[in-house]
Image: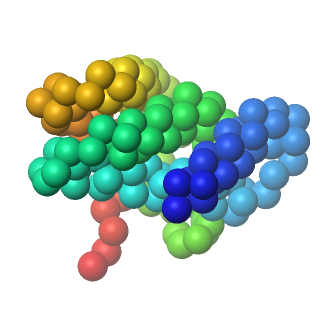
Amino acid sequence: MHKIAQTLVVGITLAAAAGGALAQAKPEDMIRWRQSAYQTMAWNMGRIKANVEGTFNKDQVVQAANTIQAIANSGMGALYAAGTNKGKGWRDTQVKPELFTDKDGVGKVAMAFNKEANEMAKVAAGGDAAAVKAQFGKLGESCKACHKDYRVEEKK
């Protein structure tokens, strides 16, 4: 499963870094790529959570934290291009229109997430379960800050 996550992260990173080629991408592809990245991050957040709430396995936490860090640093902001504010990737996009108009606010939450993801990878490498748990809380809060302002809640 680790190989699949690595392959997905590399694919997303290459797609985000493609620059000019990305400009040619269809909006539904861009939505699908970012949804894939968020699903991969959610899976890895779950892996870290399982380790801080159960038996701590440093190697698993490091793998998960490094995956989150890679996505955070992939430049996936480019996947929020014009025309991707509505539509369908794997499912309907959950992005609020404010994400496309509130550049300062988006920049602030994106930088906070990036900072916490980088710190999560650093703390995970240290192997201290208590420090990982504390940093995991900070990382989760940075995710929630973006969700609160820029994500439409799923209809149940």
- Residue 62 pos. (x, y %): 39, 36
Q: Quadrant of residue 130?
A: top left
**Left or right of 15: which side holds 121?**
left
**Left or right of 116: which side holds 67?**
right
- Residue 73 pos. (x, y %): 55, 28
- Residue 54 pos. (x, y %): 14, 53
Q: Quadrant of residue 143?
A: top left
Tell me what residue is drawn at x 75 percent, y 40 percent. Answer: 14
- Residue 3 pos. (x, y %): 60, 55
**Left or right of 85: which side holds 63?**
left
Vertical relation: 31 (above or below) 57: below
Tell me what residue is drawn at x 27 percent, y 45 percent. Answer: 57
Vertical relation: 49 (above or below) 154: above
**Left or right of 25: which side holds 7?**
left
> Considering depth in this image, is 15 or 57 the residue closer to the camera?
57
Number of marks in the image? 0
Tell me what residue is drawn at x 29 percent, y 22 percent. Answer: 126
Vertical relation: 29 (above or below) 111: below
Q: Is residue 145 visible?
A: no
Q: Is residue 121 visible?
A: yes
Q: Where's the C terminus, which quadrant? A: bottom left
